[in-house]
Image (cartoon, rainbow, N blue to C red):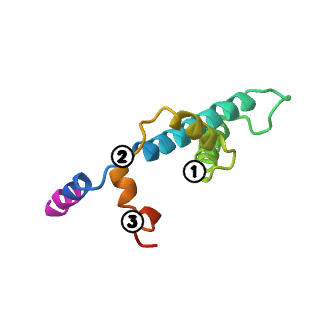
Amino acid sequence: MTSIAAAMSALGSAPKPSQREQLGEAAKQFEAIFVRQMLAAARKTDFGSDMFGDQAMDTFRQMQDEHFADVAAQTGALGLATMIEAQLARFLAPESAETDADAPGNPSDGAS
């Protein structure tokens, strides 16, 4: 039980992601949902009788499409998440000047 408590305390002390990071993750999730819906609509098309038209194959194809959508969104293969993030980032509050000044390699830190 102590390892669970240690893991929970480590989770609580993890740094909170910035709004931009949260926006990027939400954009990737949206892209995955969009691709899933697109693939599901494409699968509904009927090109005649299917030799393997049982429920097991339908379940397999659904799982395959969901995995493909997740991979495509995480790798940025379609680029939808990047465009969504760029458009919505305009509405985020600007980052504070303190965090910019503390960034390593910042030319304004006097280490020219």
Q: Residue at x 73, y 32 (%)?
A: 43
Residue 102: numbered disc = none
Most foreground residue, 97 or 38: 97
Residue 25 place in picture, x, y as percent: 48, 44
User: Which stretch did the figure color magenta?
Assistant: 1-7
Task: Give the residue pinned by disc 1.
Answer: 74
Q: Quadrant of residue 1?
A: bottom left
Amino acid at circle 1: Gln
Most foreground residue, 20 or 29: 20
Q: Is 17 rendered above or below residue 54? A: below
Residue 96: numbered disc = 2
Cα gap from disc 3 to disc 2, whole angstroms: 15 Å
Cα gap from disc 1 to disc 3, whole angstroms: 35 Å
Task: Give the residue pinned by disc 3.
Answer: 109
Number of residues whose C-alpha sits closer than 10 Å to that of mark 1, classed few (under 14), some (14–19) or many (20 or more): some
Most foreground residue, 66 or 77: 77
